[in-house]
Structures are given as structure tokens and as C-alpha cells.
Image (cartoon, rainbow, N blue to C red):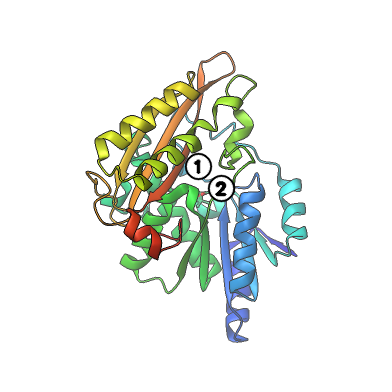
């Protein structure tokens, strides 16, 4: 496995592989790798001859007061995990490599970036789309693989590649969960003995909404009330950032589950330590009205 810190080196690798007719898949990450990331690597392996994983904690996607400094950076463990998973190249640039002195170029996807996490984390997706653009330019992949836990991120990146004409397939991989339903996330390490047992409530709330839809309850207001009740009951320390129904592609608001698959997206904040700081967990499901559910497997979009 090669570890490459420079964009130019990665471009040379990509050019050579492409000339030899080999397919490249990129797995962009911020490190602190867990089973969820390894599922992305596994999917990348299935789709390509060469797998590139990027490890880069991207400063521009963190807002002031967010956890950029505290974000875990276990580089040696991440490299070991990549080696064991059969990764070919790890791209691990320094901040100055991707944001050279005086950098002032950003890539912004407008409407899809605005609701949900975009509303509570202004500037977050501008940072994501800027760095993903740089990673695509560096790795020149045929496919780039992302986790559907960050559903909005996948929708935003899809819009980005369509709008800028990148010749890359964006692949979304279903969320990997702990046995109690908690979605794997590098931020789960911030949960403590009080909040960790409450965190699976996000998943329980999503399952309650899925069950209600199966029973024929399709009204948005009722479904969102059910979700909020479930969170309040199971996670008294949590505060809901948002619980919303949206079109899975455009992310425009949806009044209910009206004949088409509908995204139910959820973000809940939990206090950490003595409560001055918060960890924010997200999760989602795509609700399908009973007739559509029979036709399409869950979690395959956007
Ligand atoms: O999902 C992430 O880990 C990050 O947002 C990404 C896509 C690697 C960009 O920094």
C-alpha cells in the first residue's frame, strides 16, 4: 500500500492506472475509520481494480465552535485498517496541500445544500463540495463511494458531479449499525455512559415511522409527531435539531409520503462531558408508501 501526501503524485498514479485500462474507486474519509468506512472500501473493491482512500480532516467543513480540533486523528490505526482491507493507495495530504497559502476558491452547490444539516451548519456543504472536488481532481476515479448515513452529503455530491460534468459514478452504501441500531459514526466516541444508551433512539424513531407508513399512515405531520415522541421518550437528554420529510433527490420539503419514496432525516444533539459541548448524531431512512415498497429495495438512493 502506498501512502501519498501530494496531489501531483496521486494524479500520476491515476494517469498510469487509467492508461493501463484499470478502474479506480475513491473512498473519501476524514479518518477515524470504523466498520462503516470498511463497508465503503469493500464496495469500492467490488467496483474497481484500484482503491484509493483519502484521510483528511477537512477544516472548511467545520463551523466556528465545532469539533475540528477535537476530531479524532488516529493515523497509524487508520493506515493499518486500510492495509488490512486491501487498499492500494492512501491519500493523506496536509492542510496546506489542499488549501495552499492564500486559497480562495470554493465550490458551492446551492439549493440542495441549504436545508437539514445545511441549515444548522452554515457553510458545511461548501467545505464538503470544495474538498470533494479537490479529491476528484487528485484521484481521477471512475467511482467515488460514500455512506448513506450522510444522505444529504450524497445528494449534494451527486448534484456537484452532474453540474460540473465530472465523469465519475457516485455510489451510496447503506448505513452500518451497532447491534442496538446506532449508526456507526466517528463521533460516537464522544458519547458517554449517560448518552450512549439513549443514542439508538434515532433508529427506533425511524423504525416507528417506517412501521406507521406500512400501516398506511402517510401524513407528514403525524409521522413527524411520532418521531419526536419516540426521541423524547428514548432520549430525554437529546434535543432534536431537525426531523423532516424531503424529496430524496432535490431535498425539497415533502408534506407526507405521497406516492413516492420520501426521505425522513433526523439530527439530534446530545450533551457531552459536563454539558458545555454537544455531539450531534444524524440518521435517516427512505419511507416508501406500501405499493412502492414492494418494488424497490430500501436505502439504495440517492
Ligand atoms: O463524510 C466525510 O467523511 C466527509 O464529509 C468527506 C466526504 C470525506 C469530505 O471531507
Residue 247 relative to residue 80: left or right? left
Q: Residue at x 57, y 52 (%)?
A: 29
Q: Is residue 237 above or below residue 26?
A: above
Residue at x-position 35% and y-position 45%: 213
The residue wearing badge 2 is 95
Query: Residue 59: which numbered mark, if any?
Result: 1
Vertically, is 44 above or below 73? below
Q: Is residue 100 visible?
A: no
Q: Spatial distance from mark 2 to mark 1, Cα to Cα? A: 8 Å
In the image, 174 versus 96, the foreground residue is 174
Q: Nearer the viewer, mark 2 or mark 1?
A: 1
* Marks 2 and 1 close (CB-CB < 8 Å): yes
- Measured as percent of width and height from the top left, residue 45 is found at 64, 69
Would residue 244 appear left or right of 131 to someone viewing this image?
A: left
Residue 236 percent across, percent down from the top left: 47, 18
Residue at left offset 70%, top offset 64%: 87
Q: Answer with the quarter of the image where residue 256 lies.
A: top left
Amino acid at each position: 500500500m502506498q501512502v501519498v501526501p501530494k496531489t501531483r503524485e496521486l494524479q500520476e498514479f491515476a494517469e498510469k492506472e487509467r492508461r493501463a485500462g484499470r478502474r479506480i474507486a475513491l473512498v473519501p474519509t476524514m479518518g477515524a475509520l470504523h466498520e462503516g468506512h470498511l463497508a465503503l472500501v469493500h464496495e469500492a473493491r467490488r467496483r474497481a481494480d484500484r482503491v484509493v482512500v483519502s484521510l483528511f480532516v477537512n477544516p472548511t467543513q467545520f463551523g466556528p465552535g465545532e469539533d475540528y480540533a477535537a476530531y479524532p486523528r488516529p493515523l497509524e490505526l487508520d493506515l493499518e485498517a486500510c492495509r488490512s482491507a486491501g487498499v492500494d493507495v492512501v491519500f493523506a495530504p496536509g492542510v496546506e496541500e489542499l488549501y495552499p497559502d492564500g486559497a480562495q476558491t470554493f465550490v458551492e452547490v446551492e439549493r440542495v445544500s441549504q436545508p437539514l444539516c445545511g441549515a444548522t451548519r452554515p457553510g458545511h456543504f461548501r467545505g464538503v463540495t470544495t474538498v470533494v472536488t479537490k479529491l476528484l481532481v487528485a484521484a481521477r476515479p471512475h467511482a467515488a463511494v460514500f455512506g448513506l448515513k450522510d444522505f444529504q452529503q450524497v445528494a449534494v455530491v451527486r448534484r456537484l458531479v452532474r453540474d460540473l460534468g465530472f465523469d465519475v459514478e457516485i455510489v451510496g452504501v447503506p448505513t452500518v449499525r451497532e447491534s442496538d441500531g446506532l449508526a456507526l459514526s466517528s463521533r460516537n466516541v464522544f458519547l458517554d455512559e449517560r448518552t450512549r444508551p439513549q443514542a439508538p433512539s434515532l433508529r427506533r424513531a425511524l423504525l416507528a415511522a417506517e412501521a406507521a407508513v406500512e400501516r398506511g399512515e402517510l401524513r407528514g405531520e403525524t409521522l413527524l409527531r411520532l418521531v419526536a415522541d419516540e426521541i423524547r421518550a428514548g432520549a430525554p437528554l437529546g434535543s432534536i435539531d431537525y426531523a423532516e420529510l424531503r424529496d430524496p433527490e432535490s431535498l425539497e420539503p415533502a408534506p407526507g409520503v405521497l406516492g413516492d419514496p420520501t426521505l425522513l432525516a433526523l439530527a439530534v444533539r446530545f450533551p457531552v462531558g459536563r454539558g458545555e459541548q454537544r455531539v450531534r448524531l444524524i440518521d435517516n431512512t427512505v419511507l416508501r408508501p406500501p405499493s412502492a415498497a414492494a418494488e424497490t429495495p430500501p436505502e439504495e438512493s440517492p
